Amino acid sequence: KGMTDLFHPLARNDSPITCGSLESCEAFQALKDGVQGYYTEDDNGDYADDATWVLTSSFVILTMQSGFGLLEMGNSTNGNEVHIMIKNVADVIFGSLAYWLFGYGISYGTPSTPFMGLGQFGPNGTYVPSESGLLFSRYIFQFSFAATSTTIVSGCVAMRMKFMVYCLFAFFSIFVYAFVAHWVWADDGWLNQHGMHDFAGGGPVHLVGGMNGLVAILMLGPRTGRFDGTRPKSSFKPSSPVSMLFGLFMLWWGWIGFNCG
């Protein structure tokens, strides 16, 4: 009875507090209006659920970085393990920076043209507050696609590219990917408007990554002694079939997140 004295005069007469009596209480109405003002309709909408689901799909896709690393490491010769794995780390570090600076804006920024996006470079929380979680989760999700496209090249140039050169590639490859992603996946992208349908990133991710890898190996050439007979074939024996199989499984379940996100 002591606390209810503060909120409703009927309580002092030992009268039961009903829904009708609470509705007539000014203190209760003020508390109710304050709660409703704090939790808006947008905040209680689907934004949190959508962001959680998109982030979950992103984490599944980003496990492919480990899968690619294990697959490439197992296919390379002994002594190249750290170099292979650190390149996959560079994909995430330099790729995420590049995608935040200009990649997301080119791919999905507004306003936009059929060729590229023209806004939202360096996305931040100054947009609609209730949608900020969805914005950042979408950035992580789209970056996971860009990182996958970049890391394809890591295996193509295994054992024959300096680490600092690869770091530069990991940064600027996002620039190439961002344009193709806009053409295919943005609502006003020119390939999208011509009816192109992409499945699981086959165009912007795998085709772009494969073409980048092809250009790289044509520029670098084969590993020293690989085909000219100056080194025995045993020098190029894969170091770990077990790592290759672990990488295979991680790539398998990593692809699950591509479409459902």
Image (cartoon, grey):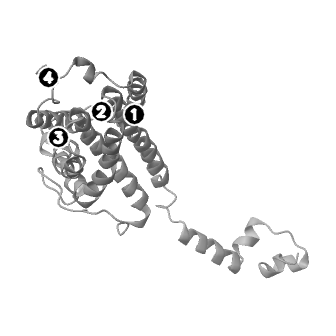
Q: Give coordinates of residue 119: x percent, y percent.
A: 21, 62
The residue drawn where x is 39% and y is 21% is 241
Q: Is residue 109 shown to the viewer in this render?
A: yes
* 218 w.r.t. 20: above or below: above
Q: CA distance from mark 2 to mark 3?
A: 15 Å
Amino acid type of the residue tagged 3 in the rendering: Asn
- Which quadrant does the N terminus fall into? bottom right
Is 212 positioned to the left or the right of 84 in the image?
A: left
Query: In this figure, which residue is indicated by the disc labeled 4?
Result: 230
Query: In this figure, which residue is indicated by the disc labeled 2?
Result: 200
Amino acid type of the residue tagged 1 in the rendering: Gly
Q: Nearer the viewer, mark 2 or mark 1?
A: 1
Amino acid type of the residue tagged 2 in the rendering: Ala
Q: Give coordinates of residue 114: x percent, y percent.
A: 12, 50
Q: CA distance from mark 2 to mark 1?
A: 11 Å
Q: CA distance from mark 3 to mark 1?
A: 25 Å
Query: In this figure, which residue is indicated by the disc labeled 3?
Result: 192
Say whether marks 4 and 1 touch (CB < 8 Å): no
Say whether marks 4 and 2 touch (CB < 8 Å): no
Q: Quadrant of residue 224?
A: top left
